[in-house]
Image (cartoon, rainbow, N blue to C red):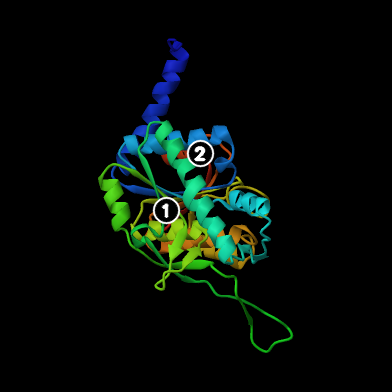
Amino acid sequence: MSLSHKKAVKVAQVLTEALPYIQRFTNKTVVVKFGGNAMVDEDLQNSFARDIVLMKLVGINPIVVHGGGPQIGKLLDKLNIHSEFVDGMRVTDSATMDVVEMVLGGSVNKQIVNLINHNGGQAIGITGKDGSLISSKKLSVSRVNPALEAPEIIDIGHVGEVDSINTGVIDMLIDSNFIPVIAPIGVSAEGHSHNINADLVAGKIAETVKAEKLMLLTNVAGLQDKQGEVLTGLSTQQVDELIEDGTIYGGMLPKISCALDAVKGGVTSAHIIDGRVEHAVLLEIFTDTGVGTLITNRG
């Protein structure tokens, strides 16, 4: 079916607007954390996959890191394995860790790989254990207990933090024209598996590969001020000030802190974007307006 003249002009305008961004980001690396609504809504899943495929086709190197909390929760419920949370992190005993590996490294990872491949891309799924990609260490959580003189150390099991990233596997996949899809499971020096927050893994990978962009998909419009307006074009100093004055708090704080650390660590810009918007990734990269909060290391 042929386009009307009006629609054809609109398509040309969109391509013209995108051109300088395509030129600027060719051969650059973009790390995208995939999660939230975008991961469970079928239309959003496919729009995300097409965005990633198009990025690769125009010469950008996307790296996808994904979560899978709701899917893990569902399988734990089915298996009657009780879950507890400490400061938003799932307490992960050995039985829970088996489920985490099964869901993140198996079903969810392969679903995303299949989505990208079905939409014309070439993706390969790996976990942080493959090629010792993510070396991790046990995460210690401390909490103030009025009954104790010192903070209480809480053992949350097989929950880890990134110790180091071995980019050899990523480089090999990118050089072979594949799109890496990474499950956030690390391995310790002793060979123990660790469940790691996907935002943190995405941030550390972006920092290590000196990515042009870190993009974190969320279920909100972006970072908002006290009046509910979305803030964007922020410097790292402005973000520090927003944390200090309490504008950034609660559930958004870890995500913003992750983005901030990545930018301070050498990533050119970080984006907190609304994953509920179709083609949110393309809109943020290739248009003048974008759909979220931009944090940059440039003043």
- What residue is drawn where x is 50% and y is 62%? 196
Name the image quarter holding residue 242: bottom right
Q: How many neighbours does mark 1 have within 10 angstroms: few (below 14), some (14-19), or many (20 or more)?
A: many
Q: Quadrant of the N terminus?
A: top left
**Whole-number angstrom distance, CA of label 1 to CA of label 2:** 16 Å
Where does residue 70 sit, x and y in percent of width and height? Answer: 62, 50
Instruction: Please indicate, yes or no, whether residue 287 appears anywhere in the rendered image.
Output: no
> Which residue is under mark 2?
280
Q: Quadrant of the C terminus?
A: bottom left
Q: Is residue 260 above or below residue 27?
A: below
Where does residue 192 sit, x and y in percent of width and height? Answer: 46, 69
Q: How many neighbours does mark 2 have within 10 angstroms: few (below 14), some (14-19), or many (20 or more)?
A: many
Look at the numbered disc 1 and give the secondary structure of its residue. Answer: strand
> Which residue is under mark 1?
269
Say which of 39 and 227 sits in front: 39
Which amino acid type is shown beneath numbered disc 2? Answer: Ala
- What residue is drawn where x is 28% and y is 44%? 27
Drawn side of residue 175 relative to residue 275, left or right:
left
Which amino acid type is shown beneath numbered disc 1? Answer: Ser
- What residue is drawn where x is 39% and y is 31%? 17
Q: Is residue 84 above or below residue 215?
A: below
Look at the numbered disc 2 and give the secondary structure of its residue. Answer: helix
